[in-house]
Amino acid sequence: MKYLDEYRDPGLARRLLDELAAVATQPWRIMEVCGGQTHTLVRQGIDELLPAGIRMIHGPGCPVCVTPLETLDRAMAIAARPGVTFTSFGDMLRVPGTRTDLLSLRARGADVRVVYSPMEAVRLASAHSDREVVFLAVGFETTAPANAMAVRQAARLGLRNFSVLVSHVLVPPAMTTLLADPDCEVQAFLAAGHVCAVMGWREYEPICVRHHVPIVVTGFEPLDLLEGILMAVRQLESGRAEVENQYARAVRRQGNPDARSAVSQVFRVADRNWRGIGPLPGSGLELTEEYAEFDAARRFDVGRLHALEHPECIAGAILTGARLPTDCTAYGTRCTPRTPLGAPMVSAEGTCAAFHAAGRAPTPRSAS
């Protein structure tokens, strides 16, 4: 296949759906970990076309959504300071903190800028030595190599006015935490292809063995996902629990050695708090001591923060797959992409945003 349309061929999609119906003999529950995959499943209606009994559970695969509230509050406290140029990818600007968001802060005069690469922030720091330039480094393993390279470049240039506010999270510990929950319904995973393109899938193999769950590394187009679901169901039906690679055109077992090396030089594994979920041991990255001078959290003392989630937001239950966005009492009314109460309604990978964009109606509720 060479062209995008081939990954969206309706005839092939129908054949995969028919094969799924022929293979599945009992109900199965599969979680896609990536928010990009969630958007494809919901936008294309794949989750509603699957044979009866096969249910997709939408997981915590949106990096914007799982960035902890206290990190956002810290980001805004830093961005509000005189002499600071605060940079971020655009999807972080409208994520609500306890009291406001970065976009509103910019409207009030803070120097908050959208960049498309962390290297843009490095160039800003190099060109404006009179400003403290801070980059909000969030994301899963996918964005970690670029952020590591930016820190290394700042070190090479001797930039003392560049720093990163780090909130990187790791996928395997989140999967392990979900599976350890006695109420977990997940029987198989679709792993995010772009994460595995960087890290490979060796870290998933012990999860398969320990929890006896199939994990299929999957792409993001409709046929990728349908084939990934079919591969997972075949494993479930046969009693196997292995890592399989549907996304063979982009992913190798060892990942990208150069990218992994860059990450390991700049970052080390650390405990991390996940928004709506809580602290997960060994589930994040932080700067090593060698690069600690570039840690914005150390450089800027913003005092004690009192992060407070909106009382109506059920982001935690949505991110773990326990609830659907349409179960939320604020969904589509008090919480919309223009007036979000929580991160899943903001991000391009958020489950609530996916449901809203697809026009999914709120769950009917009986009159009290």
Image (cartoon, helix red, strand yellow):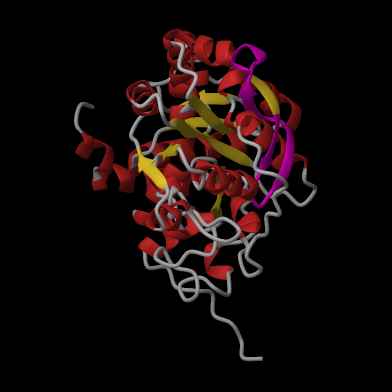
Residue 175 position (above or below residue 321):
above
277 displayed left or right of 53:
right
Q: Residue at x 49, y 40 (%)?
A: 34
Residue 48 seen in the current view = no
Q: Residue at x 36, y 29 (%)?
A: 117
Q: Which residues are magenta?
A: 271-292
Spot occupied by residue 252 in the image (x, y as percentages of width and height): 45, 15
Spot occupied by residue 305 in the image (x, y as percentages of width and height): 69, 50
User: What quarter of the picture does the C terminus occupy?
Assistant: bottom right
Q: Residue at x 46, y 11 (%)?
A: 158
8 displayed left or right of 257:
left
| Quadrant of res 1 | top left
Residue 179 seen in the current view = yes
Report the label total.
0
Residue 209 is a magenta residue: no
Residue 201 position (above or below residue 138):
above
107 displayed left or right of 31:
left
Q: Residue at x 52, y 9 (%)?
A: 261
Front one among 28 and 225? 225
Residue 323 position (above or below residue 142):
below
Q: Main secondary structure of the magenta part?
A: strand
In the orientation shown, which residue stands out farthest toward the bottom?
368
Spot occupied by residue 163 in the image (x, y as percentages of width and height): 51, 26
Spot occupied by residue 281 in the image (x, y as percentages of width and height): 75, 32
Front one among 177 and 222? 177
In the orientation shown, which residue stands out farthest toward the right?
182
Residue 281 is a magenta residue: yes
68 displayed left or right of 340:
right
